[in-house]
Image (cartoon, rainbow, N blue to C red):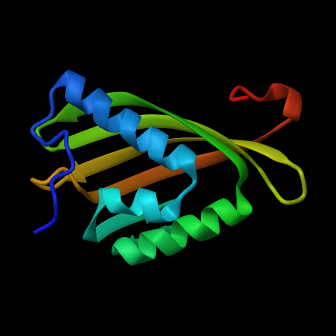
Amino acid sequence: MENPRPPLPPFTLETAKQKIQMAEDAWNSKEPERVCLAYTIDTEWRNRTEFINGREAVKEFLKRKWDKELNYRLKKELWAFQDNRIAVRFEYEYQSSEGQWFRAYGNENWEFDENGLMAKRFASINDLPITEVGRKFL
């Protein structure tokens, strides 16, 4: 049994927003070892066209992600919540190794276990090339 990771479901408006802020802060750390601890050992993900299973696979995915998405900065906001599920809208910016800036837009659907760990994460994401001057997240 893993240690609980509050806030725990069922979520209220306040605890759903708290869970989202915790996720945003963790992802902005760009520390795969830290971020992956928010997920169950057998977590299931869909990220764009990639299907990821398990916490270790999440950690490897995040290492690859932040090796190529430089100067990453993310913002998440609540879309909806009920019981042990939260839906978020997000956007983030990053720079490619060639120097091109991008803004990614998307939605995520999250499902949590009774310990507050994310068991399922399904993300739909679209990228838009932007200029450095057009950045929102400085």
Asked whether 14 or 52 is in front, the reply is: 14
- Residue sitting at x 62%, y 70%: 64
- Residue sitting at x 22%, y 22%: 14
Left or right: 13 as drawn, with respect to 26: left
Question: Residue 92, relative to residue 125: is it above or below?
Answer: above
- Residue sitting at x 25%, y 31%: 16
Left or right: 78 as drawn, with respect to 111: right
Asked whether 29 or 59 is in front, the reply is: 29
Q: Does the image show residue 51?
A: no
Report the residue that reaches farthest toward the right. Answer: 98
Question: Residue 70, relative to residue 136: is it above or below?
Answer: below
The percent position of residue 130, horizontal first and vertical second, equals 81, 37
* Quadrant, the N terminus: bottom left
Left or right: 110 as drawn, with respect to 100: left
Question: Residue 115, relative to residue 102: is it above or below?
Answer: below
Asked whether 63 or 4 is in front, the reply is: 4
The percent position of residue 84, horizontal first and vertical second, equals 15, 44
The percent position of residue 75, horizontal first and vertical second, equals 53, 33
- Residue sitting at x 35%, y 71%: 55
Asked whether 29 or 112 is in front, the reply is: 29
Q: Does the image show residue 33?
A: yes
* Quadrant, the C terminus: top right
